[in-house]
Every structure is written in C-alpha cells, then in structure tokens.
Amino acid sequence: MEGFSFVDIFATKGIEYIIVMAFLAAFIYFSRYLGYRTAEQPESATEERPVSYFRVPDGYHFHQGHSWLRKDKNSIGIVGLDDFAQKLVGKVDSVDLPRVGYHVTQGEKGWSLVSGSRSVPMLAPVSGEVVAVNQDILRSPGILSDDPYGKGWLFKVRSPRIESDTRQLLSGKVARAWMEDALDKLRPQNPENLGPVLADGGFPIEGIAHAIGGEGWEKLARTHLLTEGE
C-alpha cells in the first residue's frame, strides 16, 4: 500500500531485546544463588542474634528466672544472668555471690543483685558445688551491663547432674521465643510509661523496672525473675 512501509521491530530492536533478556536471566540466576547460599548457612554460624530487644546467644541454656548456664569441660558449668535481667534491674551496685564450696540448687536462690538499698535475688540454673567466683564482678559490677554473657559471668559450678539439669533449661529457637514473650509480659504492666523505655524501636534503657515500676520496681523485678517470694 502506498505510504505504508513495514518495520521489522525484531530486526531493528534485536540487540536491545537480547541485552534485556540476558540481564533478566542473570538476575534470576543471581537471586537463586543468593537464596541457596542463605539456606546453606548453618544456624550455628551466627554467634549471637538479637531477639526483639534482648540478646540471646547460641550455646547458652536459660533458666526461666533469667539466669544462664554454659557447659564447660569435666562437668563444670559457668553461670550468669541474661540480658533481660541486667536491663530489667539496671545499675547494679554490688553482687552478693555464693562462696567457693557452697552448694547451689537449680531453681532456688543462687545470688542477689544489689541496687541502692534494695536486693533482688536470682535463681540458680544448675545444681552443684561452686568452684570459682568471678572476682572482677565483685570489684566492678558494671561489667554486667557491658558483657553479661562473657566477662560478666558470675561463678562456676561442678555438677555431676549437669546434663539432666540442662534438659530443664531453654536454648536455641525456644529460648529466643521465650525471651520475646518476656518482653511482651512487661507491656501491660504500665503502658503509659513503657514508651520512653522502648522508644523508636531502640534497645530498652537500663533499669526497665525502675522506669515502669517506680518505687515498686523491686517487686516488679522479683516478679519477672521468679523470686517474688524470696
């Protein structure tokens, strides 16, 4: 037909289409490769995963009173308090630790955190004889807020029943879910005061019990650490 000319779009745009298709193919391949690498990564490769607002490292076993146990060699267990406990109580002026030779019992009072004139007891995660005490914590309790899972360990216990006691504790995904639930249980206590504590999605300030409970902070702390009747 006069005035009409047929344009072969595949001939004129062939190179552009080839480039686009090659880019899409490369993108799909790269996306699948990244997905494979992520699935291949073992859970233990991540040393520590923040859960909500509190750290829950792998390799630790948690008592529901917010103490932890890390197994060492020769039936020795290392004991400490978790990130929730140290943020709940806040500034610790001193720690009342058991002496070497003392026998602690799982689920019973093992030590106390002293803040101001008030003392908050905590439950031992394992039964056994205390064989070492962290002298650095006695001298500088502020270490607890900086490194509760490392330099902030409290004491070591020799426990012939460490394996059976460990089975009563929480670890891995179960511990992380439990720690999230611990945060949720704080929310209904006094929601109008919780905002500044968890402002803008940041980590809680130290001393959540003080911020939420006011003068009744000690009772609040004991309730969440399961030592209200101690």
Image: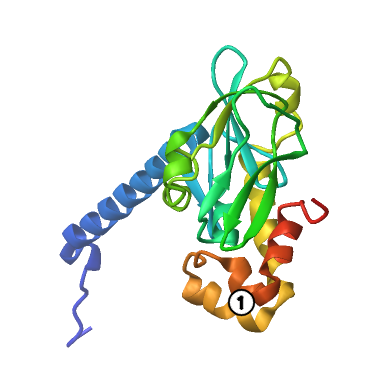
- Residue at 68 percent across and 57 percent down: it is 182
Q: Position of residue 39 (x, y in %)?
A: 49, 38
Whether residue 79 is visible to the viewer of this picture, yes or no, is yes
The single residue placed furthest to the front in the displayed view is: 117
Callout 1: SS: helix
- In the rendered structure, the answer to whether residue 186 lies left or right of residue 115 reads right
From what the image shows, is residue 167 above or below residue 230?
above
From what the image shows, is residue 37 above or below residue 20?
above
Looking at the rendered image, the quarter that the N terminus falls into is: bottom left
- Residue at 50 percent across and 76 percent down: it is 199
- In the rendered structure, the answer to whether residue 28 lies left or right of residue 90 reads left
Report the front residue among 12 and 142.
Answer: 142
Whether residue 185 is visible to the viewer of this picture, yes or no, is no
Residue 165, picture quadrant: top right
Q: Residues within 10 Å of mark 1 (few under 14, many from 20)?
A: some
- What residue does disc 1 label? 194
Report the front residue among 190 and 43.
Answer: 190
The single residue placed furthest to the top in the displayed view is: 74
From what the image shows, is residue 182 above or below residue 25?
below
- Residue at 63 percent across and 67 percent down: it is 209
Q: Position of residue 5 (x, y in %)?
A: 18, 79
From what the image shows, is residue 34 above or below residue 204?
above
Q: Position of residue 121 (x, y in %)?
A: 69, 49
Report the front residue among 49 and 198.
Answer: 198
- Total marks in image: 1
Q: Position of residue 136 (x, y in %)?
A: 42, 38
Specify the amino acid type for callout 1: Leu
Q: How is the image coloured?
A: rainbow
The single residue placed furthest to the right in the displayed view is: 229
Residue 62, picture quadrant: top right
